[in-house]
Image (tube, helix red, strand yellow):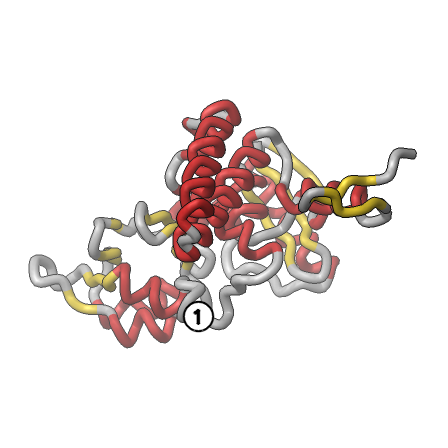
Amino acid sequence: MYYLYHIPGKKIGVTRDLNNRVTLVQGYKPSEYEVLDQSDDIDYISDKEIELQKSYGYKKDRQLYKNLFNKMRINVTEQTTTFPYNVDDLEKHLFENVGLSWSHEEFGQFEITDENIPWILTNVKTSMYNENRCYIYNKAFYEAYFNPKHNPDVKLTGNAQFDLIRNWAAVRGIYEGGNSHTQYVKLQEEAGELAKALLKNDKPEIIDAIGDMVVVLTNLAYLEGLNIEDCIDSAYIEICQRKGKMINGTFVKNED
């Protein structure tokens, strides 16, 4: 099934996997987008996408959705991403393939964008085995455009943190192969690590354990069909008006 989705004020697009494409990759919760149409007819959905992009006033895609599957086939290894063209011909193919994305086991999701094409063209190298192929180094590409520690465009605050965690988990197969029960066991393991760190007053280990627990809770929530942000919001709404007092180092709410 092909889904025609709308992110208000941003774009209209097509995908076969709303959760992966819209939530994990682009960072929008289900409440932040709408499905305008769906069909198993790729010709219909491709034409409808362009029609609605025009009617809503968005920038029209360069190619029909159905033609994206004729896009270049890249080869991804641990070290490099290789494009099936020589360096001189690469630029036009990159612009024809804006939006093409692929996954790397260590670095997560990569995507060709208008913004990173100049970097690719500057750093691409001709294959020593075939002059009609060229490649970039994955680590360098990641550091330039996708590493949140070095890239100010990647947010590490607010909900974007949880989006990065979910993307990391999806790429590593945690959602496909795991379940909430195994994540709960993992949570108890991390709680044990936190207890050890607290007893030792080891601040770096405390930070590490708390962070690991947040990652596990994020994944547990997702596997239960929830977003951890919504869980946090729900908890805060519940506690924000509570009244009570501290007893033996613990806040005890007043009985209703």
**Camera sees residue 34:** no
Quadrant of res 53 = bottom right
Q: Is residue 76 left or right of residue 146?
A: left
The quarter of the picture where the C terminus appears is: top right
Could you tell me residue 184's position as x and y percent? 51, 28
Instruction: Point out the residue furthest to the front here.
Output: 248
Mark 1, Cα crowd under 10 Å, few <14 / some 14-19 / many 20+, is some
Choose between 120 and 215: the one closer to the eye.
215
Instruction: Point out the residue furthest to the right here.
Output: 256
**Camera sees residue 147:** yes
Could you tell me residue 197's position as x and y percent? 42, 46
Type of amino acid at the residue the image marks with label 1? Asn
Total numbered labels placed on residues in the image: 1
Could you tell me residue 151's position as x and y percent? 44, 70
Which residue position holds label 1? Answer: 151
Quadrant of res 94 = bottom left
Taking 183 as reference, is 116 above or below it? below
Choose between 24 and 94: the one closer to the eye.
24
